[in-house]
Amino acid sequence: MERPFLAFHLSGGTTDALLVTPSEDAPLNIRQVGGSLDLKAGQAVDRVGLLLGLHFPCGPELTALALQWKEPVRVRATLKGSSCCLSGIENQCRKLLAEGHPREEIARVCLESIRAALEGIYKASGMEEVARRTGAVLNYDTGSTHVPNPEGELCKAFDLINPIAGADFIISICKLKSHCMTGLSGGVKNLFGCIPGLTKPEFHWRYPQERDFCGMLLDLCGTVKPGITFVDAVVSMEGDGPSSGDLRQTDMTLCATNPYELDLVLTKVIGRQPEDIPLVDCARERGLCPSSADGVELCGDPLRTFADFRMPRSRTVDFVSSIPRPLRGICEPIIRRYLTPRPKVLKNKCVGCGKCAESCPAHTIAIVDRKACIDRSKCIRCYCCHEMCPIHAIQVKRSRLLKL
């Protein structure tokens, strides 16, 4: 790559404008230059769709409904610099519904409002000018497509955002991070961003057990089939990743055509054995990668490893594997209840924004007196609240028994 370019990452969990520039130290240097300050595009689509009585995820039905409205609609984007605010779309559509406007018109207003916001970001960030000069096509598609995967072991089909579902070749770019649930966020976990809207919490609810969730991610990877995966490990994240950890200079960029083997190598980079990382261990069980990183052919500079790379506090000692198999069914619920780390709200930092409650798949979080409160009896330990809190007011608390 010789020239910088602007990319747009649009999904249920992201609405980001990204400036990508060449670098002597790494193939890609990526910097966010704009995006949504509140709701993401996919979230806005699903919220308005549910308001109109559509099936979740609502993208396809909302698009079909909007196409039935032939009259022009007036919309206005809310912009702050090169970023936008999308929460007003839901409020506007709710008001139109209360005033008796047709469902078709409301659907059209929702999609046109998102388009107007995207146009504003494209223009403010310079992407519109770049597209004009180069002939590149800007993406305005916020819909999704149902993609079957008959070979999936746990999940036989996924709804994928349309830019992914319609792509001829997929290049996946991720950061090297520790992860509270999967142990590692790398090539495979990065593809969870292909899931639209608020469907992500739904998958956490359907697969609350760690290894089942990892198995679902492997099925997703087999559905998306990325052609090549890049990992930006120039600066990585250790500790309570993927959002509340600490940055660490690791000075590497890796890429591979096999994302499972790539994650296996990343396990070696962070100084862990494959069985320590649930996502990698599940991939080994399915035969998607060798049993160890030594079985992966490497080229380029020597691989750097970091034996002191810190893992999330949610990573517990694997007591279950040491218990005789006939007794595991009895012991596992007890171990999970008393030894599995739980999310804890830091009341002095919480501002009551509700992001944690919005992202909780089990709906165990309520905002009481402007503070988040977690119903521990219903918590499934997916750590979505920890990941999504914008001010890091939720920490992962380990059992006192593990400190003895």
Image (cartoon, rainbow, N blue to C red):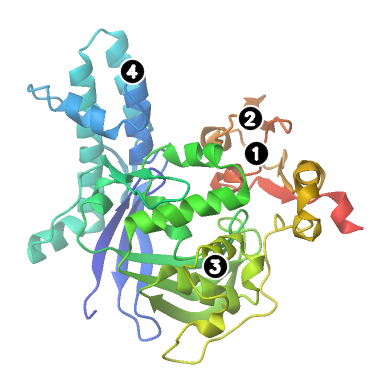
Residue at the spot of label 2: 364
Would you name the residue on which mark 3 appears?
284
The residue positioned 24% from the left and 46% from the top of the image is 162
Q: Does 268 appear above or below 18?
A: below
Q: Give the left or right position of residue 150, taking residue 201 as reference.
A: left
Along the viewing direction, whichever of 133 and 316 lies nearer the viewer: 316
Residue 119 tag number: none
From the image, which quarter does the N terminus lie in?
bottom left
| Residue located at (43% from left, 37% from top) | 198
Mark positioned earlier in the residue sequence (4 or 2): 4
Q: Nearer the viewer, mark 1 or mark 2?
A: 1
**C-alpha distance separating marks 4 and 3:** 43 Å
Q: Amino acid at mark 2?
A: Thr
Which of the two discs, 4 and 3, labels the residue nearer the N terminus? 4
Tell me which amino acid carries mark 3: Arg
Q: Nearer the viewer, residue 395 or 188?
A: 188
Residue at image mark 1: 380
User: Dot 3: what SS?
Assistant: helix
Callout 2: SS: loop
Residue contact at pointers 1 and 3, CB within 8 angstroms? no
Q: Amino acid at mark 4?
A: Gly
User: In the structure shown, which secondary structural element does the residue marked by tag 1 occupy?
Assistant: loop
